[in-house]
Image: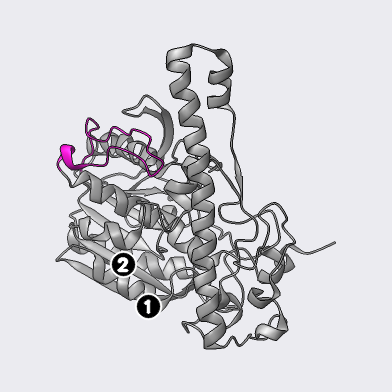
Amino acid sequence: MTSTSSRLGAGRYIDAAEAPPSTVTSVHELRTADDARVSGVLRTVPGARTVVTLMHPRQDLTHHVLVPELLARGYAVWTQGTRSVNNDLALVHEQALLDVAAGQVFVQEKFDHVVTLGHSGGGTLFAFYHEQAGLAPSQRLTTTPAGRPIDLASADMPIPDGALFMAPHPGQGALLLRLIDPSVIDESDPMSVDSALDPFDPANGFAEAPESSSYSPEFLVRYRAAQRQRIERLDEVARDRVAEATDARRRFETSGNPVDRRTALAPRILTVHRTDADPRFMDLSLSPNDRPYGSLFGRRPDLTNYGLVGFGRLSTPDAWLSTWSGLSTNADFVRCAPGVVVPSLFVELTGDQACFPEDAEVMFDALGSVDKTTVGVAGTHFGGPIAPGAPPGASLAAADIGAWLAEHFDR
């Protein structure tokens, strides 16, 4: 039997501490401006006047490792899901903003101060929300990247009082643009490979784990260009499938023919193979930091790249263009960051496998706030310890977060 500590994905989940005994917990269902239903959990402690809100576009953060840390420091915590929680097949980020807005309206009515906390993909989700909430309603987005109407103008989108970011990556699409394996020749065949672009071929500089690989600059230039080209091809497929459904929908409006309606509704799912292949996972000399060998999904990218678990494996064309395409998405941290004008704290984890040092510098610089602070703490992307026996990165980050909150908001 394989022990849990030796599994490919070991280390992704960090155990949280116990919440203070005085914690009061309540569960709430909210209605969004477009009449979807989302749910969240509110935890508060006596005297809490500031609430920290945690969200992620795809994941359930109810038991996030920072929840008890914040409660212990006297802050209330709101953890909420989107309409696509734990199933990002149809995740459209513009719709997710309406989910965020519903939660912000809810907590604004209950607390003196509201602060967003975006960890990993939650960072870009909240940066996107801050950007759109800060615009006049008439200036907000009116369509998704697939061309579908989105009504942000009529939504109540309160602006939070502060923004916290812990190990935010550059965005789902920007991240995938660095991770996608460009050696895939046939999108219908997960084993098809162009050996000249294969990052796991020793001829290209790959070394068996855990020895660091060594890719040449020439290979990396070709590799990055080919990654972009693969995203471009997938974008074209997605747009063709959107157009097919749109044409059928328009035909039905005039024909009333059930066949046209069925054609419009028929799922056109993109299957995207091999999306865990950033050369920096295997070559630790690239974008050097304190990260261990391996990816967000495990210690053997040469294996996890071919597995079921991974970014963007299955998505509708609309979700692909809105969330996973680094060339089409609106949900890009650097694009959205100038719209984050409230006091901000950016916590970089020194062993991050998704936000590398040059990313963190650009992302922090892009924030529009004049009151912004960046700190670095030892830890891995999910808040784990940087080395066996070291304190969890999340606990170290919580100390900086708590000090920043105390300085900016009266408890």
Q: CA distance from mark 1 to mark 2?
A: 14 Å
* Numbered label attached to residue 358: 1
310 or 349: which is nearer to us?
Answer: 310
* Numbered label attached to residue 325: none
Residue drawn 54% across the image and 40% down it: 316
The image quadrant of residue 1 is bottom right
Name the residue furthest right.
1
Residue drawn 37% across the image and 51% down it: 125
Q: Earlier in the sequence, mark 1 or mark 2?
A: 2
400 or 173: which is nearer to us?
Answer: 173
- What secondary structure is the stretch in magenta mostly built from? loop
Locate residue 241, reporting x and y percent: 53, 39
Q: Is residue 145 magenta?
A: yes
Is 286 left, or right, of 271 in this rendering?
left
Q: Nearer the viewer, mark 1 or mark 2?
A: 1
Q: Is residue 298 above or below residue 140?
A: below
Q: Looking at numbered disc 1 in the image, what kind of residue is underneath it?
A: Glu
Residue drawn 40% across the image and 30% down it: 28
Residue drawn 54% across the image and 66% down it: 179
Question: Which residue corresponds to mark 2?
Answer: 346
Q: Looking at numbered disc 2 in the image, what kind of residue is underneath it?
A: Phe
Q: SS for tag 2?
A: strand
Locate residue 18, reporting x and y percent: 50, 53
Highlighted magenta segment, given as a residue range: 136-158
